[in-house]
Amino acid sequence: FSKHAPRQMIEKIRYVWDSIPSQLAKENKKFVYGLVREGARAREYEDSLMWLSDAGEIIRTYNISKPDIPLKAYADLKSFKVFLLDVGLLRCMSGVSPKVILEGSRIFEEFKGALTEQYVCQELQLFKRLQTNYYWTSSSAAEVDFLVSDGMEVFPLECKAGLTMNAKSLKVYRQKYMPRLSLRTSLLPYSQNKEEGIVNIPLYLLFALHEELAGV
């Protein structure tokens, strides 16, 4: 940052950058300026976020309350999440030991979801022809982690860090909007539930998402 950013922005960029792990650790991962620095306001730090985004250091995903085409037209530009460019970087910045991930730990369960969502976010950046930097929320506190669109349809994508498939928010979304296909990614093997229109894609196989959508 000291080498490339404008001098007057360096301190603010560092504050934003250092706040990202704690932003993602929250149950509601929406970016909150007050977590950057006490009393911080959007007008003070928006330019720092823009610099990090333009430099490719962060990924922003925007809240959608109405999943219609095009997604960009329905994005709330004031309500967004901020992810890093790499899941390994998030682990290092958070001070999480690799052993905790490999061996498992009871006290690691909550942040494991943040790492998983970070991983999925960066994998979705591979698909340049898809719109992926969006998520859905409703007034009933339901939230679907990502919305994926090919420009013709919108597909909900729910992320799971483990083997538990309790996806209440995805169920709420499906009942409300009846998508032709719903996606879920987890540690479980690949599976299709044709009756419900749900496909589970293993986390390690997420790079093949475009092939799944091509077959819809």
Image (spheres, rainbow, N blue to C red):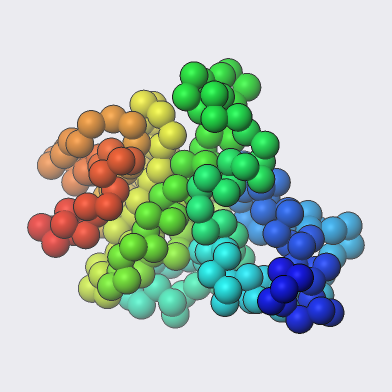
Q: Quadrant of the C terminus?
A: bottom left
Residue 57 in view (yes/no): yes
Seen from the viewer's position, the closer of residues 48 and 160 is: 48
Q: Quadrant of residue 129?
A: bottom left
Does the image show residue 60? Answer: no
Query: What residue appears at the point 63 percent right and 70 percent down from the top-left corner?
Result: 52
Question: Looking at the image, how many numbered discs can be counted on the residues?
Answer: 0
Q: Quadrant of residue 66?
A: bottom left
Residue located farthest toward the left when viewing the structure as drawn: 215
Q: Position of residue 206 (x, y in %)?
A: 29, 48
Residue that protrudes farthest toward the right in the picture: 39
The residue positioned 62% from the left and 22% from the top of the image is 107
Quick check: 209 left or right of 99? left
- Against 149, is 156 above or below? above
The percent coordinates of residue 87 (x first, y second) are: 51, 47
Residue 20 percent across, percent down from the top left: 67, 53
Relative to residue 122, is residue 60 depicted above or below?
below
Depth check, front residue: 196 or 129? 129
